[in-house]
Amino acid sequence: MKKKYIIYMILCAVSVLFVVAASIIYEKLNIWIPFAVSIALMLISIVWLAVFYIKNVKYRCPDCGYVFYAKTIEIFLAPHIATRKRVKCPSCNRYKWCKEVWE
């Protein structure tokens, strides 16, 4: 559970650092190839991290305790705070502030 979350956070940080480093190389040395490659890799990593997140995060309803996968559209468009999102519980059939549960 925590291991996958830590891996997710490390991959996010590495992706951002790679783009920052490539930006600095472009600015200082005026070499655009590392910057273009880093942007392409960043786009690939964003898609990969989104899929990783969708497949590894479930939500627990605060009322009934039901653990479920949310719909993909709900995951990205739902209001959220820290580790909670307002998603629809399939058991209660109501929108609740459900807590994220990493597999």
Image (tube, rainbow, N blue to C red):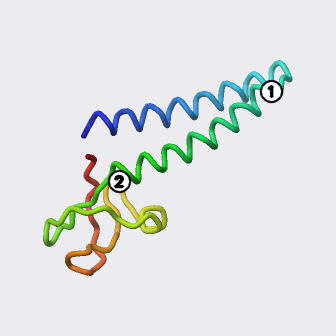
Please identify the quarter of the rendering in which residue 40 is found.
top right
Tag 2: amino acid = Ala
Q: Tell me which amino acid carries mark 1.
A: Ile
- Point out residue 22 in the picture as x, y percentages from the top left corner: 71, 26
Residue occupying the far top of the picture: 29
* C-alpha distance separating marks 2 and 1: 37 Å
Q: Residue at horizontal 20%, vertical 75%? A: 91
| Rendering coords of residue 103 (x, y %) | 26, 46
* Residue on which the image places disc 2: 82
* Number of the front mark, 2 or 1: 1
Image quadrant containing the N terminus: top left
Q: First in sequence, mark 2 or 1: give its number.
A: 1
Q: Name the residue under label 1.
A: 33
Q: Within 10 angstroms of label 2, few (less than 14), some, or many (20 or more) residues?
A: few
Residue drawn 31% across the image and 61% down it? 69
Front-most of residues 16 and 47: 47
Number of numbered discs? 2
- Indicate whether 57 appears above or below 38: below
Measured along the vertical axis of the image, is residue 11 above or below residue 49? above
